[in-house]
Image (cartoon, rainbow, N blue to C red):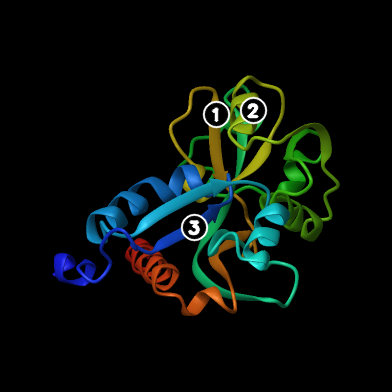
Amino acid sequence: MPGSRSKKWLEPNAPRSSSAQSPTVAPYFLPGRLASFSREFPDIRVNVVEGLTSELLERVQDGTLDLALLALPIPGGHFVCQELFRERLYLVVPESHRLSSHSMVRLKMVHLKQVERDPFQLLNDGHCFRENTLSPCERARLRPNVVFESGQFTTIPAMVGGGTGVSVVPQMAVERRRGCRFIPIADEGAYRRVGIVCSSSSIFAVAPTTSLRHFEQSAAAMT
């Protein structure tokens, strides 16, 4: 029972788990999982921060954060990584775009070369999803016509919906959004891997390990 598992973690020495999330993952994956974790392990204090990949990795390495939920792979060999799931990438275009004139039934996928001349929206350097976006572009031999770069992921679909260009988003960000159409990219490699990153020392601590297992179970339920 959840209560019996948490009895050994009582105040005032309740363990803490400090975790970090990428802004391209946190709004979609975290809220429900964090709420269920708190219900199952009420005596573990969870502190969550959001930030750029490079900043979060530094904090995991120096021990100020126990774990981070990020897009994989990550640079450096000083971490323990566990993939949680993979998700398809989608092209997002304005409703007024020429590709939007096709029904979702007829246009099941799109080749990135079809938007070669379109204005492109992209995340700033330092965001892990920037590389996830550029990789399929490189495979398609597409050099994006970048006209707007943002530090906030949620700004990009809003800009696309306003008719200012096109972009790429992960499947978890696909939603009914006014002004936008989402189309799967015709590339078997157009997906991102999302996983947990820990330092080699924190992986053996009770609270971070419990958090990791909970995220693994939640991710398994998605597949």
Report crowding for label 2: few under 14, some 14 to 19, many 20 or more residues within 10 A (C-alpha): many
- Mark yes or no: residue 12 visible: yes
> Tag 1 or tag 3, which sits nearer the N-term?
3
> Tag 1 or tag 2, which sits nearer the N-term?
2
- The picture places residue 52, in percent across and down from the top left corner, at 68, 48
Q: Residue at x 33, y 48 (%)?
A: 32
Per the model, the C-alpha gap separating discs 2 and 1 is 7 Å
Determine the residue located farthest toward the front in the rendered image: 12
> To which residue does mark 1 refer?
180
Q: Residue at x 25, y 63 (%)?
A: 10
Q: Regarding mark 3 in the picture, which secondary structure is present there?
A: strand
Q: Is residue 94 above or below residue 125?
A: above
> To which residue does mark 3 refer?
18
Specify the label residue 123 is tagged with: none
Q: Are marks 2 and 3 in contact (CB under 8 Å)?
A: no
- The picture places residue 175, in percent across and down from the top left corner, at 45, 37
Which of the 4 image quadrants contains residue 7? bottom left
Task: Work out whether residue 70 or residue 131 is closer to the camera in this orientation and state it.
Answer: 70
Q: Regarding mark 2 in the picture, which secondary structure is present there?
A: helix
- Mark yes or no: residue 132 visible: no
- The picture places residue 148, in percent across and down from the top left corner, at 78, 30
- The picture places residue 35, in percent across and down from the top left corner, at 30, 49
